[in-house]
Amino acid sequence: MGVRHLANRLRSAGFVFNFSSQLLANILSLLVSLVTLPYAARTLGAKGFGDYNLVLSFSSYALVFSSFGFTTYFCREIARLARIADAVNFTVSLRLLLSILSACGLWIVVRLAFADSEELQILAAIMGLNVVFWAFDLRWVFIVKEQLWRVAYMGLVGQIVFSILLFVFVHDSSQLKLYAWIQLTVLIVPVILSNIQYASQFGRLRFSLAYDKHQELRRESLPLGLAALTVALNTTFAGMIVGLCLNTHDLGEYAAGFKLVAVMNQVYVLLATVAVPRISRLYVANRTGLLQFLRMYYSVCCLAGILGGALLFICARFFVHVLFGDQYAQTQVLTQVWSLTYVPLNAIEVFVLSCLVPCNSSKGYLLSLIAGAVVLLAGVPAAALSFGLVAVPVAQGLSELTMIVVGTIVIIRRLRLTGSEIATFFNVSYLTREILDRIR
């Protein structure tokens, strides 16, 4: 009994240590970004910052196609294996081949779309290298092996090295290509560290495409890849359309403002990170407890969305002026429109999507993402071309609302909620009383 108790304590301590180290690293990384991002935006100017983010949007799709879900599949498989070397070798080898093809595809697409812009083509080539280097990133192995503190320090070291190089070498808008080269260190440093650590624990990587479950790999990876592609659409498509339909100066202002919005999203994601394990346990064990927890979680997300939106609306002028400067004239208005539309809805969308997978509804999760992506694909170009940059956040808000509606319908059907149970989620006094009871 004593040995078993000690083992449980050690596992519990390991979980707390992994979670706290990851949380601390995320906070430090966010603080570093709050310094480096405004510096880069001010130094490069709205147009240069927009040029970089336009090509970055294209490169995000190259990253999706360089794995298309099979890395997630192997994360699950490797967690079940005692010897992981063969599976990791196959994963990295396949990622390398697809990454080279994706990087070439990225450059070709940018070359065709922007034949008159040599600078954008050079940026695409540099980001293509980033796609290829990503194939050798082994941090996912340490996530599977529950060594999150290693993942945390690798990413943080990369951010610190990037920050030093940025402040030392980038001083004006003519150094956009140099900025892109320096940005590679955010990935290259963790790649080097993860490979050194992997070699010391599991041996050196070897190129191998031998695998005996190709049919299962294709079957399992396809829905995961579609989900990853849909997530990429939901997060980068609006910025890409701003750059294509309007201009890269507007995209620079859009990207600067959306970074402020992304800070709020990180808060919501942190809430989801804490809530998802609890939802998974309660779903199979205690329906009454699950509904109580979901009501509390929903209330906290709503409160976070309202407070986050209000804070961003009130402080938008201060944040934009201090962080980015007067050259980002439209960013303040954009940020305030986001604070009234996208920010509060995004909190509820995170709640809905984070409930779907733990409740065994991966298809509902994918369906919600696809529905939101369809609205985004139709709404953002129409809004940008008809009403200009300021209307884009409204289209994004409609996309969030669509995901909320579709996901909520799936949750209601999955949990077989009655009308009275659904009503409790909209009863403010009931929700407030339940939160106060939990606090007491």
Image (spheres, rainbow, N blue to C red):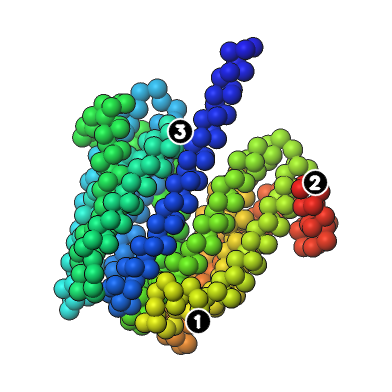
Is residue 342 something that shows in the picture?
A: yes
Residue 146 got which mark? 3
Residue drawn at (62%, 56%), measured in percent from left and top? 352
Q: As drawn, is 387 to the left or to the right of 208?
A: right
Residue denoted by label 1: 333
The mark nearer the N terminus, 3 or 1, is 3
Q: As drawn, is 142 to the left or to the right of 349?
A: left
Q: Position of residue 323 (x, y in %)?
A: 42, 71
Type of amino acid at the residue the image marks with label 2:
Arg
Cα distance in 3D space between marks 3 and 1: 43 Å
Q: Quadrant of residue 421?
A: bottom right
Cα distance in 3D space between marks 2 and 1: 41 Å
Name the secondary structure under disc 2: loop
Cα distance in 3D space between marks 3 and 2: 34 Å
Q: Residues within 10 Å of mark 1 (few under 14, many from 20)?
A: some
Q: Residues within 10 Å of mark 3 (few under 14, many from 20)?
A: some
* Circles 3 and 1: CB atoms closer than 8 Å: no
The mark nearer the N terminus, 2 or 1, is 1
Callout in the foreground (2, 1)? 2
Quarter holding the N terminus is: top right
Q: Nearer the viewer, residue 126 or 73?
A: 126
* Circles 3 and 2: CB atoms closer than 8 Å: no
Name the secondary structure under disc 1: helix
